[in-house]
Image: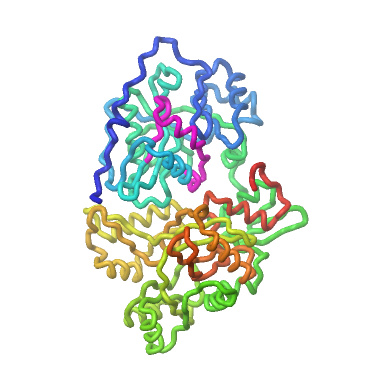
Amino acid sequence: MTRRAFRLDRDRLGSLPAPPPQAPGARKTNAAIECGWGRLLFAHTFASSADLIEAMRQEKPGRRDIAMYLEDPHVVLSQAPHELFLDPSHTFRLRLAGWRARRHPRGFDVHRLRRRADVDAVNRIYGARGMVQVDPEFVWSQRESDALTHLVATDVVTSEVIGSVTGVDHAAAFHDPENGSSLWCLAVDPQAAYPGVGEALVGALAERFRSRGRSFMDLSVLHDNASAIALYEKLGFQRVPVFALKTKNSINEKLFAGPPTDTPLNPYAMIIINEARRRGIGVEVLDAEANYFRLSLGGRSVVCRESLSELTSAIAMSRCDDKAVSRRVLAAAGLSVPDQTTAGTPEEDRAFLDRHGRVVVKPLRGEQGHGITVDVRDPDTLAEAVERARRVCDTVLLEQLVEGQDLRVLVINHRVVAAAIRRPAEITGTGDRSIAELIEAQSRRRAAATGGESTIPMDAETERCVRTAGYAMDDVLPEGQVLAVRKTANLHTGGTLHDVTDQLHPALVEASVKAAQALDIPVTGLDLLVPDVGGPDYAIIEANERPGLANHEPQPTAERFIDLLFPYSAVQPGRD
């Protein structure tokens, strides 16, 4: 399919008539609008502070209500200091008169919701971003609403939703005499391969409200979200002295409880620490640089390094650490594993390559994809790959290449908690940028989406993958051409994860649990190659003793991990 320039769906985004003008003084009082994730209360329409406080007390469980345009925050907070807090966000305003959307990158479109599945995709992105998810049926029922606008960005090739934004038309919502509007819940899929998705969504929403004759569009952004603030300022937004009020609930706790007293650790440790704190479990950071911490509750304490804890025995850890041992243990348990041998003489290595045609070369010990070369087909590349792997570990393994999707299955306490397809780092051509420039740009996006944990190395393996595809690093990739620049799908080398937990075939679930039992390990991330996640066929490649729990959000990985460590800790209502 030919890539099309980003376009506005004019009949959807720009041609709806504006609401009829309202008579002076017709503004609604005590105005609020349901948004799917909670209510937006227009605080300046409430007759009294008491009315606003009472309305905020009506917040439903699992929702996040926001009272915007608070005129006397000191007065309201003095009347309910234990229930409410002032949101630590800045408000920015875009004046819409004369404003025009910029030209945006190719590869995706922006439009209103078209399919019920679009809402589920938006919730998936919200979950990955740690945001409150919406009521799907409510949002779908409001897809033609004048007051609420839900826009999505979709890949023109795959039709997958890669971003979303919600807009509120104040004139339609409460007959706003200032003729304003606001933007909420801007979210871009952290796996999105295209630049400018967030900017395009903001521009499309602003264009819609401008065409309706609205005077401005406001948004609220956390005070320390430097990248988002930079984007909004680039688009012409200016900060205004507008305040928002929220309730002190568990969802908002990190906004009003203050920063933790200890040094923040990496995302894989923090997801566990945050869940522990929610349950009242004590946290003591032992080594911030190496991500060691101790969790304590009552008379029980457990030392962890991310998802590796004292509950994992040295024997189990050594089995996972040594890939050859892992394979023998799994094979002895009757599980499907690929053929494997230890690299030896050039003649022996060539014989293994001749037997299988295509092989994987990897160090016996190692993590995060270091030293692994996938899809080796000739003796010269094989010799180079073996030498590269020996820089990581003296012992090198040759393994039969098994075709299929790269599946990571997370097993905690002998139960499958999450599963995700891992895809290698890839770039999409724009027709005017070199492959090296595209890789660098995609690497920056992956780093921003993962807190610096995922980047694409500009190394010999990346160059080999580009060369194998018939390109050089300084070639300009044709517009719309997708190019995989790594063979391994490891997150730390720029790979992306796509949740398939609910699609997993029962045979894959059974095999994963059996593998964890054979290794006798309480927490493991199993790497499988499968033709289809909905089918029974598989080959287990390796087991990881310290899998990244944060990679599988919104699956309840941290919850299940804490359940394992502290089975009698407080359980939130509604959680299984």
In-image side of 370 versus 14 (left or right): right
In-image side of 454 versus 297 (left or right): left
Q: Which residues are magenta?
A: 126-152
Looking at the picture, tell me which residue is in the foreground, 359 or 91.
359
Q: Is residue 110 above or below residue 77?
A: below
Residue 574 in which image quadrant: top right
Residue at figure coordinates x 25%, y 49% from the top left: 3
Residue 272 in which image quadrant: bottom right
* Residue 349: x %, y % from top left: 40, 85
Q: Is residue 182 above or below residue 364?
A: above
Looking at the picture, tell me which residue is in the foreground, 39 or 274.
39
Residue 6 in which image quadrant: top left
Examine the structure image and report whether residue 143 is included in the region drawn in magenta: yes
Residue at figure coordinates x 55%, y 31% from the top left: 65
* Residue 401: x %, y % from top left: 41, 73
Residue at figure coordinates x 70%, y 55% from the top left: 566
Tell which residue pokes out farthest to the right in this image: 299
The answer, for residue 352, to whether it is visible in the render is yes
In-image side of 380 versus 327 (left or right): left
* Residue 24: x %, y % from top left: 41, 10
Residue at figure coordinates x 38%, y 67% from the top left: 487
Examine the structure image and report whether residue 55 is included in the region drawn in magenta: no
